[in-house]
Amino acid sequence: MNENATAGTAVGTVVAADADETAPNNTVSYEITGGTGSSKFDIDASSGAVTVHTGAVLDREAAASYSLEVKASDGGTP
């Protein structure tokens, strides 16, 4: 990823699946819960698409890489 990437630049997509056959039990939502890049990236709760956060500065000299912890939840109850 280019360190000069602007806000909204696509980074990748997180994918999770749920075996339930009907909504809302099979609806998966995503959220960033931690990692060194948690303030530098956003995730679309519905699609899992990860993008560069508005105002984030990606500086290769300051950090060679970033990590993200992502939680995927389904709409069902156990």
Image: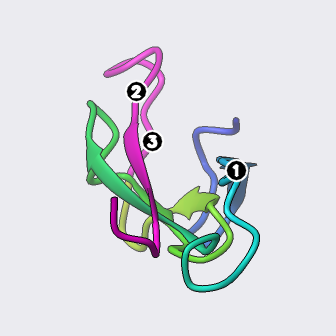
Type of the residue with mark 2 = Ser
Mark 3 or mark 1, which has the lower sequence index?
A: 1
Q: Nearer the viewer, mark 3 or mark 1?
A: 1
Question: Residue 28, image x and y in percent?
Answer: 57, 66
Q: Which mark is residue 67?
A: 2
- Disc 3 marks which residue? 58
Give the magenta-colored segment's residue range: 57-78
Q: Are marks 3 and 1 in contact (CB under 8 Å)?
A: no
Disc 2 residue crowd, few under 14, some 14–19, many 20+, Cα 10 Å: few
* Residue visible at 59% across and 61% down in the picture: 51
Q: Amino acid at mark 1?
A: Ala
Prevailing secondary structure of the magenta residues: loop
The amino acid type found where label 3 is placed reads Leu
- Neighbours of disc 3 within 10 Å: few (<14), some (14-19), many (20+): many
- Does residue 24 sit above or below 39 in this rendering? below
Picture coordinates of residue 27 (x, y %)? Answer: 61, 74
Q: Is residue 39 magenta?
A: no
> Would you say the residues marked 2 and 1 are in contact, meaning their CB atoms lie under 8 Å apart?
no
State the residue in front, 17 or 1.
Answer: 17
Please identify, in this view, whether the residue under mark 3 or under mark 2 is nearer the observer.
Answer: 2
Element type where label 1 sits in the image: loop
The image quadrant that residue 1 belongs to is top right
> How far is the residue under mark 3 from the one under mark 2?
13 Å
Comes first in the chain, label 3 or label 2:
3
Q: Which residue is mark 1?
A: 17
Q: Which residue is at the front of the view, 1 or 60?
A: 1
Q: In the rendered view, tell whether residue 17 sits above or below residue 28.
A: above
